[in-house]
């Protein structure tokens, strides 16, 4: 139980730090930070693919919970990457000259 409380308190602190870091970013830095977020999400996609598919390669079903959570992580990270590219494209379009 003490191990759980220790890890949970670190998680809560990370949530607060992340909140204040993200909301204090100026809009000009949004695009570079979004690119970094997409890179991190791509690493999550690789890990999720490993969690979902590697057990199937060796004819082993693997833990169903790990495969399920890997699939959920794959879906969420894919949505995050796709949304990040949409937001980045929209931000970059704001700085282009309008066609006459």
Image (cartoon, rainbow, N blue to C red):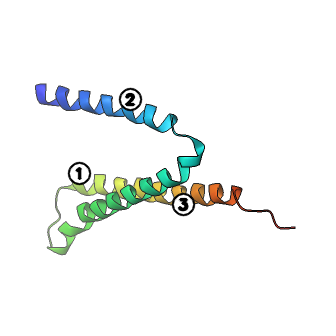
Cα separation, mark 1 vs mark 2, equals 28 Å
Say above or below: 75 vs 12.
below
* Spot occupied by residue 34 in the image (x, y as percentages of width and height): 49, 53
- Residue 1 can be seen, yes or no: no
Q: Name the residue under label 3.
A: 85
Question: Horizontal and vertical percent for residue 70?
Answer: 29, 56
User: Which element carries disc 2, helix, strand or loop?
Assistant: helix
Disc nearest the viewer among 1 and 3: 3
In-image side of 21 versus 50 (left or right): right
Residue 83 x, y percent position in the rendering: 54, 56
Mark 1: give few (<14), some (14-19) or many (20+) Cα within 10 Å.
few
Q: Which sits earlier in the primary sequence, circle 1 or circle 2?
A: 2
Numbered label attached to residue 65: 1
Q: Dividing the picture into quarters, in which one does residue 38 lie? A: bottom left
Q: Residue at x 19, y 74 (%)?
A: 57
Kindly identify the residue that appears in the image at 43 percent across and 53 percent down: 37
Which residue is identified by label 2? 16
Query: Can you see residue 13?
Result: yes
Q: Is mark 1 on a helix, strand or loop?
A: helix
Secondary structure of the residue carrying tag 3 is helix
The CA span between labels 2 and 3 is: 26 Å
């Amino acid at each position: 139980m003490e191990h759980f409380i220790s890890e949970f308190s670190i998680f809560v602190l990370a949530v607060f730090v992340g909140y204040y870091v993200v909301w204090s970013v100026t809009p000009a830095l949004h695009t570079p930070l979004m690119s970094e977020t997409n890179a991190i999400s791509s690493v999550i996609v690789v890990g999720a693919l490993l969690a979902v598919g590697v057990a199937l390669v060796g004819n082993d079903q693997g833990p169903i919970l790990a495969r399920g959570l890997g699939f959920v992580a794959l879906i969420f990270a894919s949505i995050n990457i796709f949304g990040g590219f949409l937001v980045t494209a929209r931000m970059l379009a704001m700085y282009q000259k309008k066609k006459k």
